[in-house]
Image (cartoon, rainbow, N blue to C red):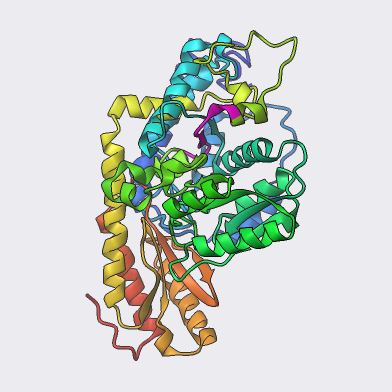
Amino acid sequence: MTEFAKRGTPLEPDEGAMRELVAKVVDRVVDHILSLPEQPGYVDTTAAIEASKALVERLPTSPTPFEDLLDELFLEHAPQSFTTAGPGYLAYVPGGGLFHSAIADLIADTLNRYTGVLAAAPGFVQLERNVVRWFAEIIGYPASSSGILTSGGSLANLSGIVAARVEKLGDEFLGGIVYVSDQVHHCVSKAARIAGIPRRNLRVLPVDESFRLSPTVVAEAIAKDRGEGHVPFLLVASAGTTNTGAVDPLPELAELAARERLWFHVDAAYGGFFALTDRGREALAGLERADSIVLDPHKGLFLPYGVGALLVRDRGPLERAHSERADYMPPIQEDADLVDPCEVSPELSKPFRGLRVWLPFKLLGVEPFREALDEKLDLAFWIADRLRELPGIEILAEPQLSTLAFAVDRKLGSTAELNRLTRELHELTNGAGRVHLTATRLGERYAIRICVVSFRTHRDRIEACLEDITTALEQVLPSAGVERR
Ligand SMILES: *Cc1c(COP(=O)(O)O)cnc(C)c1O
């Protein structure tokens, strides 16, 4: 037996053992956070992928010392993974991982109260409702709106699409048509499929030069479908695409959806929380007219992975899509002011996710979040301005929020040549090890993205990013006259 396994009983450590377990973890996590600025901003996991094949473990039949396990986690696996919590992570859509939420998880998991039904933990369920109300307030939804917390944006989109399907089509939904742009997050197409919408019923529409869905294009597609006897029922807009951060023209699309009696769903998983800022609110105008909205607190509120949110203008459709009764369940609330989470969500037993938001919001107030998001907008616009001045660089997607995409200038060669040079630029930039940038494809072009979201990313790291791009560019285009600024 190891030190901890023999104190108390194996499954119930004694007082000293509990305190020691926590103390040892506190040492590790605090050291880890303090070392984040010095950790590599970019980690190539190619070797770790290969090595992971050998990581298959047998069912443990005997205890292992706690220190050995912590060593394995912190010293072996953590360094061989993307530094998603660090300031240099400008890849995909970052978040960071707020420490206060990790503390909230320890509290929530220790209390282990049941937040699937109101009767089991009325106070805690109400705290979670408050989090949903705060989100509604942030995006400008009425007090009568409702919503749920999910594991992430993907499942929030799924519940939104199911609510739309049930509300607009009832049981006969196989003829229902969904409209999305070709920039929509792939989890929306996946959600539509899981929701039973045949693939042939998904209309993937082209975007304009700013990567936005054009209301005219949608209107034409709807008219064509109606002419052919199909049943248009759902329009999905993006408020901040993952590719370029593009915000679809929400007021016009809301208008169109209302006129055509379509459910209007907005995937604001990346962009939604920018509504806390003045510039964000302006860019996201019209969001509040959606029937349902997806937000991702593990992006825009910097939480650790594992919290998404679906907000609905009216609770009715969400409830009709998810409500189910059973004799063995505790009493379900009939009072319109009270909500049983399991009645509006696909989950029954679930983690007390609300605490991950509730604790930091109450502890800090909302202001630090607003300021951090404002700073991200400043940083994205700042680096876009610098990149635009770099000879040999072309911005392919200007920042609409905190994401932008760029490539080697089209004047410098054929598309194939540009793509080769841009890929080289991308690899050299990451190779410098201070930032992690990911790429995407925009039309025929290979594009490097910069997505600034983490609360740990500040001006110094964005300057480092510009420096590394400039140095890489000098290598990729030695004759373009790139000058170090
Ligand atoms: C990240 C993202 C999603 C998916 O959310 P998960 O939390 O990863 O499941 C959906 N839409 C957009 C726009 C996103 O950025």
Location of the C terminus (image quadrant)? bottom left
- Provide residue 301's location: percent of width, then percent of height: 39, 40
Q: Residue at x 48, y 69 (%)?
A: 208
Q: Residue at x 52, y 64 (%)?
A: 216
Q: Residue at x 62, y 12 (%)?
A: 332
Location of the N terminus (image quadrant)? top right
- Provide residue 254's location: percent of width, then percent of height: 48, 49
- Provide residue 48's location: percent of width, then percent of height: 60, 56
- Provide residue 283's location: percent of width, then percent of height: 35, 53
Q: Nearer the viewer, residue 388 or 198?
A: 198
For residue 483, above or below residue 11: below
For residue 479, above or below residue 421: below
The segment highlighted magenta reads: 304-316
Extreme-left residue of the structure: 485
Q: Nearer the viewer, residue 445 or 363?
A: 445
Asked where in the image residue 219 lies, by quadrant, the reply is bottom right
Q: Nearer the viewer, residue 31 or 224?
A: 224
